[in-house]
Amino acid sequence: MCGIVGYVGQRKVGDVLLKGLSRLEYRGYDSTGVAYFKGAHIEVKKSEGKLRNIEEMVKRDPSADRLQCGIGHTRWATHGRPTTQNAHPHRTNHIVLVHNGIIENFESIRADMIKLGHSPASETDSELFGFLVLEEEKKGTDFPTSVQNAFRHLEGACSVVVMSEKQPGLIVGVRNGSPLVVALDPQGGAVFASDAQPLLEYTREVFFLEHGDMAIGSEKGITFRDIRTGKEVKREKTLLDWSADKLDKQGFPHYMLKEIFEQPLTMVDTLNGLLDRARTDPFPMAQQPGLAILEKAEEIIFIACGTSWHAALLGKYWLERWAGIPVSVELASEFRYRDPVVRRGTVIIGISQSGETADTLAAVNDMRRRGIPTMAICNVRGSTMSREVDATFFTSAGPEVGVAATKTFYAQMLAVFIMAGYLGLRRGRDTASKIPHIFQQLLKVPHMLESQLQQDGKFVKQIKEVAKRVVAQKGFFFVGRGYSFPISLEGALKLKEIAYVHAEGYAAGELKHGPIAMLDEDMAVVVLAPKDGWHEKTVSNLQEVKARGARIIGIGNPDDDKMKRFSDEFIPLPMPVGGESLDESLYPFLLAPAIQLLSYEIALLKGTDIDQPKNLAKSVTVE
């Protein structure tokens, strides 16, 4: 999520850090900073906002062009506001560090450090790691060993890169979950980064740190240790043989897979785009004309097609539950040819990734001509829909190349979720007291997902194995209740789009009203059953499926033993580390990547054209 760059060698450190951070801007961030040695002193420069703020600071320091060791960071705020104080790098005495990911046990560490006399200057979990290093140094260990021992105290997926004024010219990086890549500089020295893009400026031979690896970089090169044993280990180089096309895919075999993995970043960028991140109140939507329209809505009608329609269905659940606003969700291709009755006080919201979807555009325009307030949720600025409605809430998924929507769906879900939270707080319903906590959990979801969405990660490997065992099934039902129902519809659509397999999405309670007649050993039923308010009812439906011999693929909480017993295959959802419960309204953000990856892996095994499925276009601009 956050971006890390580190360098020690013969080059100008200011240039290396700023170029590297610019290559990581796509990851999403709200503050940035750099730190570099000036003699035996480490100079720290950081600021909220964009990288250009730091660029100006570095340019005003003429000595930066003569220095050769430093670290830099772009931060997405979770623990603490997006302020200069909370920006990285963090200094604790002579230790300066940058950090990616979340320290799950930060509260207990903070309490321990305060008891030992330390005074945290920021609201972040990251700064606490510096105090741990200082405490380890008191035991007489050297700087790298102190970092190694301190890291063992952390719980959660994260990476740190650290410098010490007592060891000029040395950078230590540790990875456990959050990615970290290092490379030798051909001119002498070492480069650190949170992904490979900043390294391509200097070399195509890189080392991807494994979980539990520590890298120690100096002008002489890089050595690796296992932090569990402290012993030096060898790591093999990876040659990045990337053409311009592959670079655009960032090494992924398909754009669709790349875009699934980009969903944590999509979440960050869309939050940054829709919220006023300088404020600390929950769901602080940035001021724009659409807010006044939204606040006056007595009823909302969503108009959409395909995947966007599924995002709208989720909006209905969230808005009705939190804001108490009646919500209708209409298929644009039907709505535009009906004679709908629209009452005074109704707001029309069209949802379209491209802003050019013909049916949605026509339906929204018809309502506008009738004098009804219209808004859009769209991913493309300057699109026809965004120009013609009264106001647009823009998602920030970036360009999506794969025809089957993934990250744009994710951004649409997030947009309607934010709307629901914003209105829920202002409508004063009995659910309003829960919304601040839900917002704080929402901010942690991108980090939680990023640690799971790794090609070599357990979550992805489990889905690959399930796909291998079910690829021969002749058809699939995706079922769920409540928030899981729209995701079941989307799961079936994804499988049809890219694997050309018969698939249907149903509300789980509807199985016995006809579809159950089709169930036999050749059919698979994907059951979306997280531990929410509908869980027990969904499991009850699951027993009906099992009695008819269909193959059951359960998707739910990792500790759901009942689901595991009933399922032939089970995919555990990524969940917060440390036993923290997750509000049920957030489960769609965990379910979506699971059903997308399952469809992708089945399509991969079938050998279909995943990025450009037959008969489909990215934007449906005709009826």
Image (cartoon, grey):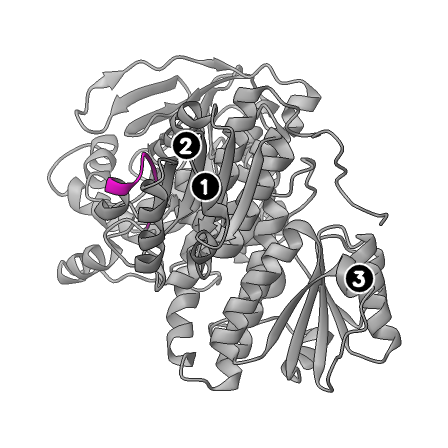
Residue hosting label 2: 463
Instruction: Answer whether labels 1 and 2 touch (C-beta < 8 Å).
Output: yes
Give the crowd class for mark 3: few <14, some 14-19, many >=20 residues within 10 Å: many
From mark 3 to mark 1, how far is it between C-alphas? 31 Å
Residue 572 is covered by the magenta coloring: yes
Q: Position of residue 405 (x, y in %)?
A: 64, 43
- Does residue 110 appear left or right of residue 452 in this picture? left
State the extent of the magenta-drawn residues as a range.
565-575
Q: Residue at x 24, y 18 (%)?
A: 232
Secondary structure under tag 1 reads helix
Residue hosting label 3: 386
Instruction: Answer whether labels 3 and 1 touch (C-beta < 8 Å).
Output: no
Secondary structure under tag 3 reads helix
Q: Position of residue 51 (x, y in %)?
A: 60, 49
The kind of residue tagged 2 is: Ile
Q: Position of residue 348 (x, y in %)?
A: 73, 72
